[in-house]
Image (cartoon, rainbow, N blue to C red):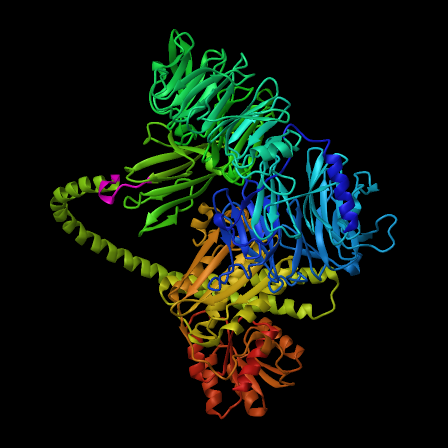
């Protein structure tokens, strides 16, 4: 503490010689609970790209627009909302997304522009090491964040997360701050020193000359340099890598460690563990009072706007705002080192610089521009004690004249002279003397309200002219607001009737007819030919014309000037008018045509200025004005204006009234408002924070308003009763400094009532035509109906005949193709089991794939024929939904992996466990959709999701990241023999174009449908909705493919094969013998009966289409002879009646050719299990 005190003393001594025209005394405007701020404990501040201020508070995340707050908080009824309220870190990235850390709740993000909430927590992202985040930054699209105990994380744009910890080279896993330098190096502040990450490599960076590495609190980049705040002081790393420490570094050692720093001209704003500091040039930092509780408290953050304005958290109060032109104003109040009086109604320029102040208790002080306050001496103070000073002026000899409530006082070096109303010689008028002026000839003019006006000798005080109220002096009751001198030295008086000018020849005051009217509260001459008056309605500007004055312009409420009487008015050296009022201090610039307001928004403690307590000094460069709370405001009238900037105008909200409440307008380029809801409200916000109450808005609706509608400081407009039509609402705004924002607009449409729409009119006309034509057409339709019925019957008969012929042809073709396909596929499977070189194995695989493709084409054609003939039969049974999904995943996942794709399944816990339906057909649909997704997706993933369908059934979704489909492709997708890009797709990927058509037909047969949602370049999602019935839960698990794959072997069996085709027989025999079975082959039924009669068999496999005695008859004969072992039908028949007929004949299993070794093994095992 002693070291800090020494530095403060040195800083104050150095600052004493660096005062500006007005002492630089920062005064912050507090934004707190009155503006909706949820808490006064604020951890971080940030400005987004639009200009909104974001505040991380202990009770939620707040966004400030200059008028009010929008707040995001924890809501127990909103599971997607914030998980907590204590926001402890804040960051706005390059895409204007707002990132923030919730205590113990991970990271939240509000996207742009809708500000939808996204949460990133350890539970959902296991790569995140901790939900306690303390630091956030970004570079490009990558987000970097540091946690309390899990190191540094990087989240890339695609959602991938990387992590660095102490094991990777960082000094510690406790991260306090993160910052990128200009070269792209990430600097890491930890509790055990400084680290950095370059090119994915983490390392510790020691401070030069330091043995024990200190705790690093914050990192702040500045250009190519980096400020590093530590427990051992402040370091700066220059762009060339050199480390330096400012002379005042030791001031900011713990427990006063620096927390944030921002450049301000030739100095810096600094926050620390003990408050806010300001550093200028080579001087040491000095503390700055913020206006909150006067106790040391850490300030974690500050934000400096591009225009130089500053935002700082103020513990216990809210957040403080310092305007960019804060150096223009200084306010002096009572207290140690401050003013001594209570209220100062008497203010006048001092010849030696600064102003004289006269207070109610007789206190006279001189406020010097360098900030010093001078007193007149103890003897003078004693002589004036108790006198209520109303006015004061200094003459050419340096003597002070003061008007009190009862007397006139002249103050010399060490003497006081006083004139009273009852003096025998040169008495003053009755009433308080509230106006004093020194004329160019050195005489003194005074005005006592209700008493009169006097001119006195400036040396002796002798009366030269005495004009009492009500006599021939022309002053009536002397209810004056101001006495002042024109540039030629002529006295003028403003009162209830207007303006009165002194006539030196008549030695009396005369009314000025051209200026007559309402009461004039203040006036100021602008040269010999210009005059400004202040009335209750605003300012009036006059120019001299002939023998009178001509009104040039009025400045009123349209320009922001309030309807209030002035407490005083003065003109500075730049011909700007300064008007003090009970609503603040106003400055009208006639050149720039801007009106500025200074009050509470400027950090002033009071906006109520005292009547007549205003003066312009130092040649028009210094303005002083007194307020009702006893303070005095100094204004540097010569200071150059802050360079203009274009403020941001945003349409903060657009809403319509529905059911008595305002609801947000639907999003869209041209929102449509129903005819009965066309009351609309637009809330615009000009994000200029110097004085939001002085911002000005204008709006216009094209096609409705005749011109721009001035809205004053209210950015909201309610529009009601718009007739139907299309409209464009335009908004303009100008901030308190006269800077205009870019125009914003929104297009919308008010819909007419349905009976006034073009469709309604057209419908009425059409209805009339239809009624007239209906009678004539009805008879003709009756005749046509009979002819059409006859033609339709004929076409139906032809179609049925054609369908039957096609079905018979396809069934025959299927039978004839399946038999040789058994040889092709079976021989290829047998060849695969032999020793082949890579070239030979490739040839065999190609033969097998071609055969399987041909078989799929045949099956699809047969299914299509059954569908067209209306003979598609479903085989409903109870099945386990998860088992079906596992089967599909087991078949498809390897295919996806071979193509480098991720394959994922997701089953909603609410999905039904068991269903009743055709499991095989549902599996066929899924295999088709998933197979297509894998086939057409080059990279990314394919996902299968399962969810419940209300009121019953299941919804299956297959999603991929493939090329997507356009509208024309989606329209052709479910047509037969159609593919996305026609022949091009078939050439590249293969296929017949029947799969999706058959799948759609199968879904329809189950009462469901298949929908597709796709956008080119964004993948495709197929949704299968099957409203099939739920099945009751069964204690017995349905056997899945996986369980069948792991079924224990049946052992070596002696099998009988009855097959008339030698090739098929050779294939089946080979496949069975490869499984260890003994196989006896019979070419026909009689031979099979002989074999059974002479030997024992464990099972029989019979072809149905045998010469002589067919397979069905043979089965019946075997059963009649007492053969009780399993019989399995192996046939090339494709019709749906084959399997029921086989079951009725005594077969235990049924297989369609071609068969594989796995099919044979499953069929034998299943048949033996029965």
Front in this rendered view, residue 164 or 137 = 137
Q: Could you say where residue 662 lies in the image, as x and y percent from the top left?
A: 36, 49
The picture quadrant where one finds residue 310 is top right
Image location of residue 847, percent across then percent down:
63, 61
In this view of the protein, which residue sits in the foreground, 788 or 343? 343
Residue 151 painted magenta: no
Residue found at the far bottom of this picture = 1122
In the image, residue 608 above or below residue 142: above
Check if residue 754 falls in the magenta segment: yes
Residue at 69 percent across and 51 percent down: it is: 274
Residue 658 location, x and y as percent? 32, 50
On the question of residue 634 being in view, the answer is yes
Residue at horizontal 55 percent and vertical 62 percent from the top:
83
Is 880 above or below relative to 456? below
Relative depth, front residue between 1126 and 46: 46
Q: Is residue 234 visible?
A: no
Please state the total of marks drawn on the protein image. 0
Task: Report the front residue among 1056 and 635.
Answer: 635
- Residue 1068 rendering spot, x and y as whole percentages: 60, 75
Residue range of the region highlighted in magenta in the rendering? 750-758
Q: Is residue 4 left or right of residue 348?
A: right
Q: From the viewer's perspective, is 411 left or right of 256? A: left
């Amino acid at each position: 503490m002693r070291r800090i005190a020494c530095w403060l003393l040195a800083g104050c001594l150095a600052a004493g010689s660096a005062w500006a025209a007005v002492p630089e005394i920062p005064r912050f405007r507090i934004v707190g609970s009155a503006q909706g701020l949820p808490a006064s404990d604020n951890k971080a501040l940030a400005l987004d790209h639009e200009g909104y201020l974001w505040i991380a508070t202990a009770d939620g995340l707040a966004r400030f627009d200059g008028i009010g707050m929008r707040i995001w908080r924890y809501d127990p009824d909103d599971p997607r909302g914030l998980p907590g309220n204590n926001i402890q870190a804040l960051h706005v990235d390059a895409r204007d997304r707002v990132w923030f850390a919730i205590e113990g709740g991970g990271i939240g993000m509000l996207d742009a522009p809708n500000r939808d909430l996204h949460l990133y927590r350890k539970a959902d992202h296991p790569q995140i090491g901790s939900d306690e985040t303390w630091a956030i930054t970004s570079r490009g699209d990558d987000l970097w964040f540091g946690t309390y105990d899990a190191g540094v994380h990087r989240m890339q744009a695609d959602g991938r997360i990387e992590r660095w910890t102490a094991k990777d080279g960082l000094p510690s896993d406790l991260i306090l701050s993160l910052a990128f330098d200009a070269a792209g190096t990430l600097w890491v502040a930890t509790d055990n020193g400084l680290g950095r990450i370059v090119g994915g490599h983490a390392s510790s960076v020691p401070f030069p000359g330091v043995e024990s590495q200190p705790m690093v609190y914050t990192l702040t980049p500045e250009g190519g340099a980096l400020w590093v705040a530590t427990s051992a002081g402040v370091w700066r790393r220059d762009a060339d890598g050199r480390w330096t420490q400012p002379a005042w570094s030791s001031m900011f050692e713990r427990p006063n460690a620096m927390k944030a720093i921002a450049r301000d001209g030739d100095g810096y704003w600094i926050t620390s563990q003990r408050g806010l500091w300001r550093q200028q040039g080579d001087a040491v930092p000095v503390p700055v009072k913020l206006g909150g509780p006067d106790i040391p408290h850490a300030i974690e953050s500050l934000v400096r706007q591009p225009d130089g304005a500053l935002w700082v958290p103020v513990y216990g109060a809210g957040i403080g705002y310092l305007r960019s032109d804060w150096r223009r104003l200084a306010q002096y109040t009572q207290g140690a080192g401050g003013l001594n009086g209570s209220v100062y109604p008497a203010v006048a320029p001092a010849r030696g610089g600064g102003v004289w102040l006269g207070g109610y208790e007789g206190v006279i002080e001189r406020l010097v521009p360098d900030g010093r306050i001078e007193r007149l001496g103890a003897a003078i103070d004693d002589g004036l004690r108790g006198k209520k000073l109303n006015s004061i002026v200094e003459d050419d000899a340096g003597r002070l004249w003061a008007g009190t409530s009862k007397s006139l006082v002249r103050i010399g070096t060490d003497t006081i002279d006083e004139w009273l109303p009852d003096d025998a010689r040169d008495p003053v008028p009755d009433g308080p003397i509230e106006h004093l002026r020194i004329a160019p000839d050195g005489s003194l003019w005074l005005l006592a309200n209700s008493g009169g006006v006097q001119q006195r000798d400036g040396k002796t005080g002798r009366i030269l002219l005495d004009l009492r109220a009500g006599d021939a002096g022309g002053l009536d009751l002397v209810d004056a607001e101001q006495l002042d001198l024109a540039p030629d030295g002529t006295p003028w008086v403003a009162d209830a009737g207007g303006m009165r000018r002194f006539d030196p020849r008549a030695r009396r005051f005369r009314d000025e007819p051209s200026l007559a009217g309402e009461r004039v509260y203040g006036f100021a001459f602008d040269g010999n030919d210009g005059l400004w008056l202040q009335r209750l309605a605003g300012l009036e500007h006059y120019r001299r014309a002939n023998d009178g004055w001509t009104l040039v312009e009025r400045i009123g409420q349209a320009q922001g000037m309030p309807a209030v009487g002035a407490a005083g008015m003065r003109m500075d050296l730049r011909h700007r008018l300064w008007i003090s009022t009970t609503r603040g201090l106003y400055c009208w610039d006639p050149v720039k045509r801007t009106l500025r307001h200074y009050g509470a928004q400027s950090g002033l403690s009071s906006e109520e200025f005292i009547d007549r307590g205003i003066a312009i000094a130092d040649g028009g460069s210094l303005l002083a004005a007194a307020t009702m709370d006893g303070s005095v405001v100094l204004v540097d009238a010569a200071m150059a204006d802050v360079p203009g900037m274009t403020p941001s105008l945003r349409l903060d909200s657009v809403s319509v009234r529905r059911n008595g409440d305002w609801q947000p307008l639907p999003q869209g380029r041209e929102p449509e408002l129903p005819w009965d809801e066309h009351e609309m409200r637009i809330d615009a916000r000009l994000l200029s924070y110097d004085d939001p109450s002085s911002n000005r808005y204008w709006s216009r609706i094209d096609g409705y308003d005749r011109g721009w509608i001035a809205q004053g400081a209210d950015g909201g407009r309610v529009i009601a009763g718009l007739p139907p039509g299309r409209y464009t609402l335009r908004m303009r705004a100008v901030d308190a400094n006269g800077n205009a924002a870019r125009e914003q607009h929104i297009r919308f449409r008010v819909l007419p009532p349905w009976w006034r729409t073009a469709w309604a009119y057209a419908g009425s006309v059409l209805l009339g035509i239809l009624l007239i034509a209906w009678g004539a057409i009805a008879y003709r339709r009756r005749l046509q109906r009979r002819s059409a019925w006859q033609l339709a019957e004929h076409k139906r008969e032809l179609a049925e005949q054609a369908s039957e012929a096609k079905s018979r042809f396809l069934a025959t073709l299927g039978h004839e193709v399946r038999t040789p396909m058994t040889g092709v596929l079976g021989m290829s499977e047998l060849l695969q089991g032999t020793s082949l070189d890579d070239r030979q194995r490739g040839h065999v695989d190609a033969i097998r794939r071609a055969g399987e493709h041909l078989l799929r084409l045949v099956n699809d054609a047969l299914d299509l024929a059954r569908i067209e003939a209306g003979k598609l039969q479903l085989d409903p049974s109870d099945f386990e939904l998860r088992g079906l999904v596992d089967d599909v995943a087991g078949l498809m996942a390897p295919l996806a992996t071979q193509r480098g794709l991720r394959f994922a399944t997701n089953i909603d816990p609410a999905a039904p466990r068991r269903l009743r339906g055709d499991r095989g057909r549902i599996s066929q649909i899924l295999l088709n959709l998933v197979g297509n997704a894998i086939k057409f997706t080059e990279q990314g993933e394919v996902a299968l999701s399962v969810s419940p369908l209300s009121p019953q059934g299941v919804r299956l979704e297959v999603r991929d990241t493939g090329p997507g489909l356009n509208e024309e492709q989606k329209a052709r997708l479910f047509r037969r023999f159609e593919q996305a890009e026609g022949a091009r797709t078939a050439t590249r990927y293969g296929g017949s174009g029947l799969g999706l058509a058959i799948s759609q037909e199968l879904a329809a047969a189950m009462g469901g449908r298949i929908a597709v949602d796709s956008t080119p370049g964004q993948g495709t999602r197929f949704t299968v909705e099957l409203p099939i019935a739920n099945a009751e839960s069964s204690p017995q698990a349905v056997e899945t493919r996986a369980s069948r794959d792991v079924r224990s072997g049946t052992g070596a069996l002696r099998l009988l094969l009855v097959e008339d085709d030698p090739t098929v027989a050779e294939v089946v025999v080979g496949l069975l013998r490869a499984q260890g079975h003994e196989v006896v082959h019979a070419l026909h039924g009689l031979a099979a009966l002989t074999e059974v009669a002479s030997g024992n068999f464990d099972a029989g496999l019979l072809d149905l289409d045998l010469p002589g005695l067919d397979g069905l008859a043979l089965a019946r004969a075997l059963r009649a002879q007492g053969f009780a072992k399993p019989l399995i039908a192996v046939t090339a028949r494709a019709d749906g009646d084959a399997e029921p007929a086989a079951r009725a004949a005594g077969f235990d299993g049924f297989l369609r050719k071609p068969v594989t070794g796995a099919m044979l093994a499953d069929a034998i095992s299943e048949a033996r299990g029965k």
